[in-house]
Image (cartoon, rainbow, N blue to C red):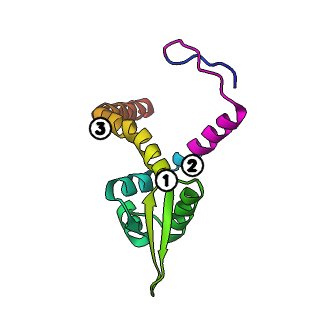
Amino acid sequence: MESHEAVRGEAWPQTSPEVEALVREMMGRVADKWTLLILEVLEEHGTLRFTQVGERVGDISQKMLTKTLRQMEYDGLLSRRVHPVIPPRVDYTLTPLGLSLSEAFCPVWLWAEAHHAAVMAARAAFTAGKADAQE
């Protein structure tokens, strides 16, 4: 990776191609809203059953929930425990790796809380400007 100018004019450190590839892959993964929402739900509620995760995330299909949980397990972000009972019971818990990723996104939530009004005002101004331009 070439040296890039950071926000404050400092050069970013050199990164190996393997690390850069992992960063790009994980950004694509966590940029998916379902991964972020599942991270939040499990961080907030701890160990949950499959149906509980789906209920707390809300508006997610069973297929998408299954796919996202499997991907998160594959990446080491959560652990899946199957209990040998009938009907089967499956619990999901964030791993230390998943908790650390969840902590990394905490500043985004704090930013959203701090700047919610400003973003809503900007959107309203943009929409009003679009309406004025069409008249």
- Dot 3 or dot 2: first in sequence order is 2
89 in magenta? no
Q: Which residue is mark 2?
A: 29
Q: Circle 2 — which element? A: helix
Relative image position of residue 108 (x, y in whole percent): 39, 37
Task: Please tell me the numbered disc located at residue 35.
Answer: 1
- Badge 2 vs badge 1, beta-carbon distance below 8 Å: yes
The single residue placed furthest to the right in the displayed view is 17
- Dot 2 or dot 1: first in sequence order is 2
Q: Amino acid at mark 2?
A: Arg
Toward the viewer: 103 or 4? 103
Q: Which residue is mark 3?
A: 113
Q: Circle 1 — which element? A: helix
Q: Residues within 10 Å of mark 2 (few under 14, many from 20)?
A: some
Q: Amino acid at mark 1?
A: Thr
Task: Write the residue at 48% across / 70% down.
Answer: 81
Task: Write the residue at 29% across / 33% down.
Answer: 114
Cα separation between marks 3 and 2: 23 Å
The quadrant where residue 70 appears: bottom right
Q: Which residues are magenta?
A: 8-27
Q: Amino acid at mark 3?
A: Glu
